[in-house]
Image: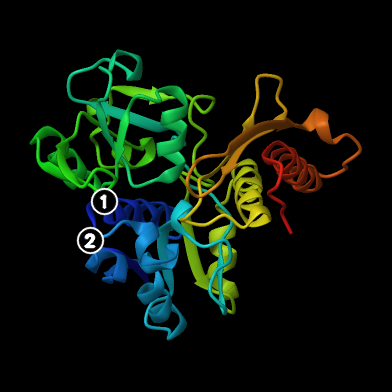
Amino acid sequence: MRYLIGTRGSKLALVQTNLVIEKLTQAYPKDEFLPVVIKTTGDIVKNRQLDQIGSKGIFVKEIEEELLEGKIQMAVHSLKDMPEEPAEGLTFAKAWLREDSRDVLILKNAASIDDLPKGSVIGTGSKRRKYQLLQKRLDLRIVGIRGNIDTRLRELYGGEAIFDESSQEEVALDGIVIAAAGIKRIGRAGEVTQYLSVDDMIPAPAQGTLALEVRADNLELLTKLDALSDEKTDLCVQAERGFLKRIGGDCHTPVAAFCDVNASGKLELRAMYGTEDGSKLASTKVSEADVAGCVSEKEKTAKMVEVAAQKICEELGELRFS
């Protein structure tokens, strides 16, 4: 069987798609898997921050259209960049490929975030990262950046002028914060200055996880993909995205969630949510011990999501989740 796999054309997207193809070819040597590069709105509009353009769907709309039309049979995305629900007629396979979920700092002239001089300029396009950084170092100057990893590194190392919308002036970057998964996958992990622990910076829901999207009626391919899934990875990813859905988070609000197995072998969910301007942030940690009485692990994670959302709701006060 021949399968065409849709992907964006960036270096990271192609690396991720080829990783999926390698795994699928090993598992199903009689089948053929070929990449198809598709340009998206997010690739075309590069001069505006994501929350100014629209929803996360700007990176997938054109790919999903070709999937629905049957021009491709599957698409590979970064799951953290996907909307909470797939487009009508499409579905995600269970999770089976996850890299390091942490965020990392890449700094020009400092050994860690604590060593940065007062007023240092850090680039990120994420409100989640921005406000968590400011919780640790309120004196930092956070500016919005966009582009693929190579572009961001070039802007950092080359001292290129970045327009800071808050001050309406051009500045040079002292560092950037990006996902560990991306820089590892493109082979530039040696340039990381500091890995930020999930306690210091809670990752985006499903960060480091690849999304394998197919037509909902393509049961044959879906069965093949699900057979390669990792149960624990899928459970954790579902909890993280479940929290995102529960609070109605989007690209306009700072939202984070990370689920893993703690030192005691129990599931643990860290979560964070706040107002769009970052004036109010709340975070919490929920473990299996907080949801006694649940029978299945799926039931446990669902209850953990509910408890986390309720705790954050109470801490933020006037915010209420539907």
Question: Of the numbered discs in the image, which one, if any, rests on residue 146?
Answer: 1
Q: Is residue 246 left or right of residue 41?
A: right
Residue 24: give x, y in percent of width and height. 43, 57
Residue 231 appears in the figure: yes
Question: Of the numbered discs in the image, which one, if any, rests on residue 46?
Answer: 2
Ranked by sequence position, the earlier of labels 2 and 1 is 2
User: Callout 2, which amino acid?
Assistant: Lys
Q: CA distance from mark 2 to mark 1?
A: 7 Å
Q: Is residue 54 left or right of residue 308?
A: left
Residue 174: give x, y in percent of width and height. 20, 28
Q: Taking 128 as reference, is 23 above or below it? A: below
Q: Residue at x 38, y 77 (%)?
A: 72
Residue 167: give x, y in percent of width and height. 24, 43
How many labels sit on residues? 2
User: Callout 1, which amino acid?
Assistant: Arg
Residue 32 appears in the figure: no
Residue 230: give x, y in percent of width and height. 59, 45
Q: Residue at x 27, y 30 (%)?
A: 189
Q: Secondary structure at mark 2?
A: loop
Residue lying at the far right of the rendered structure? 293
CB within 8 Å, label 2 to label 1: yes
